[in-house]
Amino acid sequence: MAFEGLIDLEILHLSNNYLTFLHPLTLSVLPKLMNFNIENNFLTTIDSQQFIYNPLLYVVIISGNQIRTLPNDLFQAQSYIGSLYADNNQLIAAQTFGANYVYFRNNTIRNFTISSGEITIHIENNLIDKLICNSTSLLTVQRFYADNNQLTNFECIRDMMNLTDLSINNNNISKLTTKAFAKLVNLKELQILNMIKHVPPKVFSPLASLVNLQV
């Protein structure tokens, strides 16, 4: 109940401390909370009820902790999340939670699930070898950055039809298929610096809007 009485509080920053635990009811007295930052502490978990009393929550920053998992229902009380920052943790799996802007850089994630509502996704510097998605969840993605992972193909990515920026440098992609970019007609920036052994004819032909290409 440290923050009891702060009924109009919209922004709470607890960053750069030595916090190891956040009680599930700590934020329950802050009904108008919109921006929560607990970056650079020593948290290992986030309770599934942590944000249940904060329906207006829009920006969440939990980067720089030691969190290994995030509950699937972490944002059950929110209609949507604007930005979720979870860089520099110890996450082994993650999902986007439908946030518009998602940052999961520098973790140890292997499986990454894309739901719906995302505009920008940053998942650089992980161990991701599998993207989990369905075609309808990909239509809102406009920018996708997945450098330094272990992806071997364009599964899921090839259905991001509204994508404008794509960067998947330093993965395990060794060849490009003829239809790899057939649906990505809105791409303007494409970076796929890998150890590619074969580039088929006209593979980039659908990308008439492209202004920057790095292969």
Image: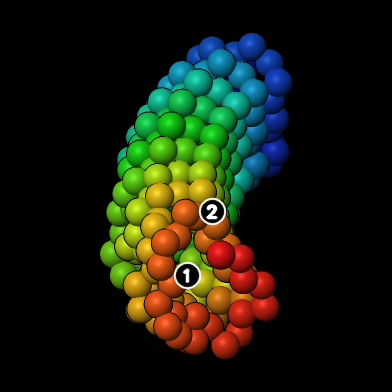
What residue lies at 66% left-to-right and 72% top-to-bottom?
Answer: 212
Image quarter for residue 160?
Answer: bottom left
Residue marked by disc 1: 140
Relative to 102, is 12 on the left or the right?
right
- The C terminus appears in which quarter of the rendering? bottom right
Q: Can residue 46 be seen at all in this image of the molecule?
A: no
Q: Residues within 10 Å of mark 1 (few under 14, many from 20)?
A: some
The count of marks equals: 2
What residue lies at 51% left-to-right and 28% top-to-bottom?
Answer: 89
- What SS does tag 2 mark? loop
Choose between 119 and 208: the one closer to the eye. 208
- The N terminus appears in which quarter of the rendering? top right
Q: Can residue 129 be seen at all in this image of the molecule?
A: yes
Choose between 147 and 119: the one closer to the eye. 147
2 or 1: tag closer to the N-terminus: 1
Q: Residue furthest front?
A: 197
What residue lies at 64% left-to-right and 11% top-to-bottom?
Answer: 18
Q: Residues within 10 Å of mark 2 (few under 14, many from 20)?
A: many
What residue lies at 53% left-to-right and 61% top-to-bottom?
Answer: 192
- The residue mark sitting in front, 2 or 1, is 2
Amino acid marked by disc 1: Thr
Image quarter for residue 88?
Answer: top right
Residue marked by disc 2: 169
The colour scheme is rainbow
- Give above or below for 124 relative to 143: above
Amino acid marked by disc 2: Asn
